[in-house]
Image (tube, rainbow, N blue to C red):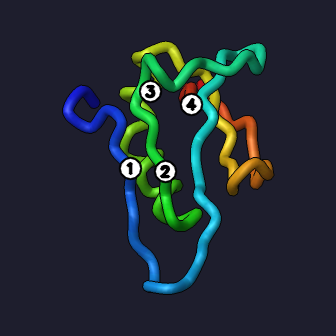
C-alpha cells in the first residue's frame, strides 16, 4: 500500500460529472479510522471502488480496519461491511 498512498483514481466519460465514490474505514464499533494513516482512494464508479476493495481488503485488515462503508459523495450506498473472513 505504501507506494499507492494518497492515490486518486480517475476515469469516466469526458464532460460527464460524476460523484466520487470512497470507502470509509472503521473499527468494529463503527468508529471511523482517519484516512491519514491509510491509503485514501477516490473512484469514479461503484464498480471501481468494489474492485479496489477486493484487491486490497487484506492490507486494510492488517492495518487495523475492521469494516468499511461505501459512500457516493456523502451518501451511504451500503455498509458497514466486515473485512474479517467468516469462520
Mark 1 secondary-structure assignment? loop
- Percent across and percent down for residue 75 are 79, 52
- Which tag, 2 or 3, sits closer to the chain's start? 2
Q: Does the residue at mark 1 contact the one at mark 2 (Cβ under 8 Å)?
A: yes
Return the residue at label 1.
8
Q: Which mark is residue 83?
A: 4
Instruction: Determine whether 28 is above or below 49 in the image.
Output: above
Residue 75 appears left or right of 3? right
Left or right of 47 on screen, residue 60: left
Which mark sits nearer the N-terminus, 4 or 1?
1
Q: Earlier in the sequence, mark 3 or mark 4?
A: 3
Judged from the image, the secondary structure of the residue bearing numbered disc 3 is helix
The residue that label 3 is drawn on is 60
Q: Position of residue 87 (x, y in %)?
A: 60, 24
Mark 1–mark 2 distance (CA, rounded to whole Å): 5 Å
Name the residue located 66 percent from the left edge and 16 percent from the top edge. 27
Disc 2: which residue:
42
Q: Secondary structure at mark 2?
A: loop
Amino acid at each position: 500500500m505504501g507506494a499507492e498512498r494518497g492515490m486518486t483514481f480517475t476515469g469516466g466519460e469526458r464532460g460527464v460529472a460524476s460523484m466520487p465514490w470512497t470507502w470509509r474505514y472503521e473499527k468494529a464499533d463503527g468508529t471511523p479510522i482517519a484516512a491519514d494513516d491509510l491509503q485514501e482512494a477516490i473512484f469514479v464508479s461503484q464498480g471501481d471502488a468494489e474492485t479496489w476493495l477486493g484487491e486490497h481488503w487484506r492490507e486494510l485488515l492488517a492495518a487495523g480496519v475492521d469494516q468499511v462503508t461505501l459512500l457516493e459523495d456523502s451518501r451511504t450506498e451500503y455498509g458497514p461491511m466486515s473485512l474479517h473472513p467468516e469462520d
